Image (tube, helix red, strand yellow):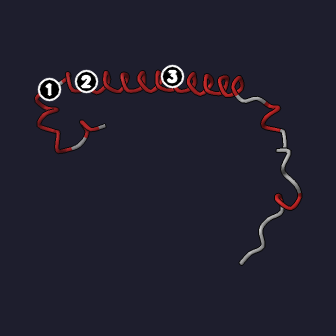
Amino acid sequence: MILDDPRFEPARQALGPLATQLADVTGRAFISGMDRAFIISAGFIMGCAVLSFLLINDRVASTVPADADEANLAPAPAD
């Protein structure tokens, strides 16, 4: 916690019990924000997965082009 840093001791002394309350409130706000960010990012990832599922046609992805033959599919010799 930043308030435990000795450089901030004068400020912590001046704030008194408010410093402890401030540290508690900011910690809770950080956790709450991270929870919200996790939920939003999980929803976005699931939405992208559904969109990809709907937009990518399986027939197109699994079809080999008509002009492909064994010569074109073989790796090129090393120089």
Amino acid type, callout 2 = Leu
Label 3, secondary structure: give it.
helix
Q: Residue at x 38, y 26 (%)?
A: 30
- Residue 71 lies left or right of residue 46; in this view the side is right
Upstream in sequence: badge 3 or badge 1: 1
- The tag earlier along the polypeptide, 3 or 2, is 2
Residue highlighted by disc 1: 15
Q: Quadrant of residue 71?
A: bottom right
Residue in the foreground of this view, choosing between 59 and 31: 59
Residue at the far right: name it: 70
Please report the residue visible at 82 percent of the width from the left and 44 percent of the height from the top: 65
Q: Nearer the viewer, residue 42 or 20?
A: 42
Q: Is residue 63 above or below residue 48?
A: below
**Residue 77: image location, x then y, percent:** 78, 73
Q: Secondary structure at mark 2?
A: helix
Which residue in the structure is indicated by mark 2?
Answer: 22
Q: Residues within 10 Å of mark 1 (few under 14, many from 20)?
A: few
* In contact (CB < 8 Å): disc 3 and disc 1: no
- Mark 2 and mark 1 lie on one chain; the one further toward the N terminus is 1
- Residue under label 3, please give it: 40
Cα–Cα span, label 3 and label 1: 36 Å
At label 1, which amino acid type do we have?
Leu
Separation of residues labelled 3 and 2 (CA atoms): 27 Å
The percent position of residue 33, horizontal first and vertical second, equals 41, 23
SS for callout 1? helix
The reply to whether the C-beta atoms of the residues labelled 2 and 1 are less than 8 Å apart is: yes
Dot 3 amino acid type: Ile
